[in-house]
Image: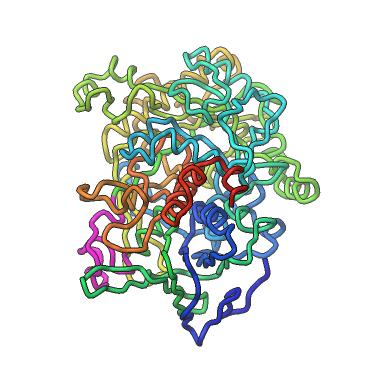
Amino acid sequence: MVQKQPGELQGLQIAGKTCVDVELLYCWPTTSNSSSPQSEGIFLEPVQKALLAHTQLRINNMADKSFDYIIAGWTKNHYGPTDWNIVTPPQPGLQNKECRLPRGRFLGGSSGSNGTICVRGVPQDYDDFGFPEWSGKEMFRAMRKSEKFHPAHWFPHNKKAHGYGGPLHIEPAPALFPIAHNLLESYQSKGLPYKPDMFSTGEASNGCGHAMRTTYQGSRTTAADFITKDKERPNVTIKCDSTVDKVILERGSDGSLEAKGVEYLDNDGNRYKVYANKEVLLAGGSYNTPTMLMRSGIGPKEDLERVGIPVQLELPGVGKNLQDHQLIFTYYELSEADLTDDARVNHDPESYETGSKAWKESKSGWLSTFPFGTFAFARVNDRLEKESKQWRAMNRKPGRDPMGLTETQPNCEIFNTVCYGGPPEYTDFPKEGQWALAMCVFLCGQQSRGYVTINSKDPFEPPFADPKYLEDKRDLMMLSEGVRFANEIITEGAGTKDIIKGSWPPTAKHHLYKTNEEWHDHVSKYASTSYHPVGTCKLGKKDDPLAVVDQHLRVYGVKNLRVVDCSIMPTNMSGHTQMPAYGIAELAVEFIQQENGMSKKASQGDSGELRAQL
């Protein structure tokens, strides 16, 4: 896109440092995946005008100078100017460890720095939201709308589970490493039946298969692809290098509040105001959306008064109910060569230079694919019920386990890496003649609840996020059981038991652990974020004291203000939050279209049908 000059908006005039009387119908302050499907979906009609005020950076020539399109370059966008650099306080449940919470701070948001994985959960996850508009049937339909699926010759996909007319390119892994076949055999020998496309269909809570990826032809596809390249539109203005401070609110004579626009700052601290004739839609994600609301005077009274912000609307749920899947990488050494990708990734002293050259020249090499193998969902509640008196004594609702899950929902997700690799803190790289991989487990149905708040009025200060990881005993026990089961799969499973030498690094002995309790110290030491925060602007009924938005995503107590990102999810789903983020945006498009006169039938069609009618 054309780089605008400072103080200039496409088709808009700014008077001094304030943009007034602008014919905008919608305005997005955004950092998340969800914003782009909204603008692509609503603003196909040229009469609509919008500003996406991105609280993130513009990176020119992204394919050459940044890592958001290099599939395996994900961590290169962490811990720097392309990250929000959020760090938790010490977490008692993690042996007082502080955790970094990377979030993408560039056009496309975290879709440019995530694992590309598309695990959509199961229908019950969304049925639990409590509204027919958000049922599993509706969310799976909405997630398909964004998708343009590319089949692979080796993969037996379910045709009805995918979309084919959206901007988001999705495919299975282009090829499987040999270790993937070994793991599939081990999963099945341990009671996890093979259902190839289960992570798209949502058909199983206990099984193994293949997770789709937001990749195609060696590059990742991101939320930015909805509104750039051939999707760029003259009636949508993207304002990058900007940080949104607050929503502009006006109070009517009857005392009601109405959103009128937003205030944002450029990188030099110059302040601008942009007004919207219809609505302001917040899509900052689970960390930034609640802090934008708080700086606007909307949120818990005590949080606002603590930093000297006048209370416009006391809404106690803003920033509360934070949930994030706990994820742990546990490493093992293999006895055989050529099963993993360690030769390219870890044995070559110039692996990154070699990989970068191959990617830039032909979108090939190890950087052109993400180093994850096969995936599984597992129900392990019965194991705890059988072995733990403490677990059997825990409260549960009818038809639910102590994690609040039904038999149709997994207790954990398990997957493997295809080489030694993971977050930057893991540095025990195998040398030539050594091969390693990780068994990764993340917790579903977590019971710990954290919060997000602000420590000042400064919009440039990162949000304060305390997830309270593993502070609920149930989370520690269930995650430990998932890791214990994964250890049994890799060390005892039919496909891997004869090729695993033991733990990695060799000084570790976790492969010998047998009981749930033995795993507690390992889990609390090594568990960290899965990059899946949700819940801080909770969807709920009006009588729910923590509800922030109604079933159409309208903020309670404020006219013309919606939240459209994963912060609205009342509970985290059993999967990766990327696809739900797009689904939430697609449903928001439908709500807005219906309220503006489009027929329900038209707005609920699949992507191709809807876009054709528009």
Q: In the rendered image, which quarter is residue 106 located in?
A: bottom right
**Viewer-proximal residue among 353 and 137:** 137
Instruction: Work out whether residue 531 can be spotted.
Output: no
Q: Position of residue 400 (x, y in %)?
A: 28, 25
**Picture residue at 52% right of the left edge, 67% below the top:** 51
Q: Position of residue 587 (x, y in %)?
A: 45, 46
The magenta region covers 294-320
**Picture residue at 31% right of the left edge, 38% below the top:** 130
Left/right of residue 182 with respect to residue 295 in the rendered view = right
**Picture residue at 62% right of the left edge, 36% below the top:** 371
Position of the N terminus, as image quadrant, is bottom right
Q: Give the total of numbered labels.
A: 0
Q: Can residue 297 be found in the magenta stretch?
A: yes
Q: Is residue 275 above or below residue 373?
A: below
**Picture residue at 44% right of the left edge, 37% below the top:** 138
Q: Among all residues in the image, which is located at the extreme bottom?
A: 16
Q: Position of residue 207 (x, y in %)?
A: 49, 20
Q: Can residue 390 be found in the magenta stretch?
A: no
**Viewer-proximal residue among 256 and 472:** 256
**Viewer-proximal residue among 462 and 309:** 309
Q: How is the image coloured?
A: rainbow
Instruction: Work out whether residue 153 can be spotted.
Output: yes
Left/right of residue 303 with respect to residue 209 in the rendered view = left
Q: Position of residue 566 (x, y in %)?
A: 42, 48
Q: Is residue 575 above or below residue 92?
A: above
Q: Is residue 129 above or below residue 260?
A: above
Q: Among all residues in the image, which is located at the extreme right?
A: 361
Q: In the rendered image, which quarter is residue 247 located in?
A: bottom left
